[in-house]
Every structure is written in C-alpha cells, then in structure tokens.
Amino acid sequence: MREQIIGHGTWYDKMAVEILERERKLDRSLDLIRTEMGITASGFPHVGSLGDAARSFAVTLALRNQGYNSKMIAFSDDKDGLRKVPAGIPPSLKKYLGFPVSSIPDPYKCHESYGRHMSSLLLEALDKCGIDYQFMTGSEAYRNGLFNKEIETILLHAKRVGEIIREEVGQEKFIEALPYFAVCSNCGRIYTTKVYEFLPKENKLLYSCEGMEIKGQWMEGCGHKDEADYTKGEGKLSWKAGEFAARWKVLDIRFEPYGKDIADSVRVNDRICQEILAYAPPIHAKYELFLDISGKRFSKSAGRIFSPQLWLRYGSPQSLLLLMLKRFVGARSLSVTDIPQYMNELNELEDIHFGRKTISDEKERAKLSGLYKYCWVLKPPAKPNIHVPYNLLTYLAKVAPKDSEIDFIKEKLEAYGYKIERDSKDLERRIEYALNWAQDYPEIKETTTRLNTKETTALKEFIQTLEIEERENQLQGAIFNIARKHEVQPSRFFQILYTILLGVPQGPRLGPYIIAMERRNVIKALKRAIKKKENPPFKIEP
C-alpha cells in the first residue's frame, strides 16, 4: 500500500497536521493558528537567528496550505538588558550595561533605540526572504499591559514557579527571589534589581538595586530601593521563569521552534504554562545550532558573526532558506564558502521540481519538490531558470573587464553553449552574487566527485606540477601528459578537473583559468577533493 503524501510532502506539512490534530483534541478554536519566533535584540543577528523565523513560517505556510488561517508573530525581546557590549559596537555603550536594550540610544542614530536597530537588521532579512510576520516588541507589550493578568498569576504562585525551576534545572534562585525584574528608577538598570515583595492589591513590587553576576562579572547595583508598577511596564518577567509561558498564553501560540541552547528554559516554561497559567503550551521542534568554521557557536557578544546580510551579498534568499529548512538535526559548521554549495543545491531541487531530474521514489520526489517550494515561500517560479554553476560565474567575474562585467559574462556563457535569456533578472542577480564573491573571496568551493585509484594518483601529480609551474600553456599540456602517464583518458581527466573546480564537466581553457583563480587556490581545492573523494548522495532531512 502506497503511503499517502501529506501536503507538499515535507516535515513542515506533517507538523501542520500534527498541530491540527492536537488542537482538535484540546478543543481550541482553529479560526486563527499562530506560530511564533523570537528576536534577540541585544546584538547583531547571525544566520542562525533567521532559523526560528524560517522554520516557524514554513509551518505557517503548511497550515495555510491545509486551508487554515495562520499567522507568525515575530517577537523582539527588547525589554531584555544588555549583558555585554558586542564586538563591533562602540565601547561607549559600556555605560549602558544592564539597561533594557529598548532604553539604550542607537549608536548608529537611525532608530529610536539600540534594540530597535538590532531587531531591524533581522526584519530586513526576513523581508528579503519573503517571510510574512506580525512584529511585536516586549517593551510595547509590557507598557500596554498585555501580560498584566499573567504577571499577577505568576507572582501569586511564585513559590511554585521557583519549585518547578528547581525540579527541572536545579536552580534555587527563584525559591527566594520573585520571578520579575524591575527597572531601577534611579540607575535605569534591570538586571541589578531584586524584587522581594509583591503587593497584589496595589499592582506593585518592592525591590532593591543590589547587583547581579552577569557573564561571569559582578555588576554592582546602585543600592536604591523603590516600588515598581508592573501594569505600567516598569519591569519584566524573567524569561526563564515565565515570560515565554505568558507570551504563549496571551498570544495564543500553537507552535514555536527553539534552539537546543534554550532547551531548559523551554521545558520550565512549558510546565509554568500548563500548571500555573492553565494553558497547553505550543508544540515545539528543537533544532541544532550552527557553528563557525572553528566549531564554536556563533556569538553576537564575542563577534563571531555570520549575518544574513553577508549571506545575501553572495547568495539568493532562497538559498538562505534552503540552509534553514533542509534539516533540523545535527549541528552544522558553516562559513561563507558554503554559499556556492547551497546555490547549486537549489538548482538541483529546481531540476527535480520541474522534472528535469528524475527521482524514482515518489515520496522522495515530493519531499524534494516540496522543499523547493518552501524555499520560495510556496511561490515558486512558473518555469526553471538557467543554471550556471557558481564557480563558473565567479571565474568569469574575476576575468571580466571592468565596467562591462555583466555583458562580458553573458557573452562568454553563450560561447560556452548556455542558452541564456539576455534580459533575465535571475541571471543578472546570480552574476551580481558572483561579482561580489570574486571581489571579496579568492577561495574556490570545490565539487566532490568519485575518483578511482589511477585518477587520484594523476590528480596528485598534477598538484605537484601546479606547485612549480606558472605558465598557462605548460599547465594545459601537463594535463594531457599526466593523464596518459597514469592510463587515464585525457577527456576524462579534464572532466574531473572541470567538475572539481567549476561544478560542470566542461568549461574555459584550464590553463588560463588556473592562473586567473591563482594556483594556490586551485591546489587547495584539488587537495580537499582528494581528501573527501566520495561524493555523498544529495539528501534532505529533517
């Protein structure tokens, strides 16, 4: 019996069905199903920051595809305090450590606050990716009293909240302190205050500005004692001790993905939501984090940033969404040099979607075609675009004469046999990406290919030749000689080199190409190809 394909055949379609089934069992309204993603407003967003939005919005799209009204909330945590001045930010902001980021001036003087500036960078990337959202900020939500009822409930049950936190993560901080941070009316900081009494009839909390350890350093409080009115937004819930839960209930959130780094907080808030606020928390999906090339997590504060804006300088919005939607499981190392791979994989998905590449397994074909559609936010083009390997475009970009680059590249592509449309906006965008790459990066992103023993040996000898030979004609001739020496057909050896270096079995003369791309870069790419050797199958997970 053939298994039924749900929606577009992806994990996101299956999740939409799971959400609908759960909501029916809970007997909750299906008139509007909200999903959520969080925006950290304390520093520059990195590509991982876009993951929440991409995955949550894909589920939103899948729900809409099932015939239901769904909306994604993009919630900016701009009521949070600044814990560290991120690398790249003027050090003068150090005087604002501990202040809510919504009350810190924008050092770039283009937004009303530091927090709004940082939020806007991620929203800009969402807009370019075609992600539809309703933007909300913590500062406005608290100021407008959106969470008042939930704050009161959590504070009245603060002892139980503290017990839940201790049971789940072993932390006893909220056994004594109330789970609320007041903004000090004297110094303006939020994390240095300790709330020690709740006056429910007056909507007030009594606090003292005592200080707090932040990022391993003690931040001294000013010693001021006062009262805060939570109905006027004079503080916020601790995000670990109930803020997520309050948001989920008030905004009626049914789905929210999260990174493994906040798994403990999500688990605690699930229980607070269920046991204290009497609201079934949303379905979650935990995803792994992106790592930089050294294997460390991207960090806004440490300056390890790979921003969405950087990706979009060299790759399309659809390739960035492919990075996010391709899979959940497994941490992935990521660098700018991975962008060509995702651009080429998107081409492969497009070929599958339009039937240019055959996939015998119907379920697998539907899943890959569905993934392609979600990369286009379910608005794919009506016909396939011209596919030119990224490496070929970057080579042509590198050798193109100044001020006539686009026309030169189009002429060369036609000479290589590509049936391009001269007025294709898609091709021009791809050329722009390649021109940016050629300007900023010399590195070649090799394509792996299968090699037998003789081919591997021939490739190693060619690398040795590259290390001493600088003349393009001599290099061109060496390819023939080395191939014959190792009983490899010259045409096959050229095909191997073109595939590794350009991603296609043929292309420009290799001698001039090697000189233009610089021998050391070609050597590195060939060595990496030998090391990998086996070409892994194209595979899409979750």
Image (spheres, rainbow, N blue to C red):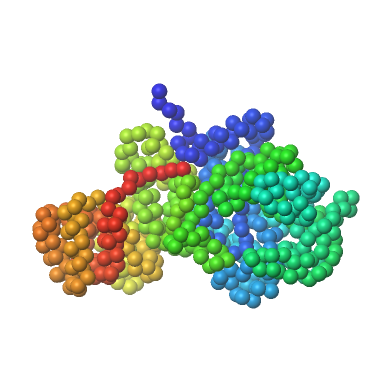
The image position of residue 383, as x and y in percent, is 37, 45
Quadrant the N terminus occupies: top left
Where does residue 104 sit, x and y in percent of width and height? Answer: 69, 68
Residue toward you, 471 or 155:
155
- Which quarter of the figure has residue 524? bottom left
Seen at 41% across and 44% down, the residue is 540
In the image, what residue occupies the spot 63% across and 33% down?
Answer: 23
Viewed as shown, does residue 504 lie left or right of 146?
left
Residue nearest the viewer, comparing 78 with 129? 78
Q: Is residue 63 above or below residue 196?
A: above
Q: Is residue 499 visible?
A: yes
Can the viewer see residue 375? Answer: no
Residue farthest top in this picture = 1
Left or right, 481 with respect to 240, comes to left
Residue at left 59%, top 61%?
120
Q: Position of residue 207 (x, y in %)?
A: 82, 61
Q: Residue at x 51, y 65 (%)?
A: 304
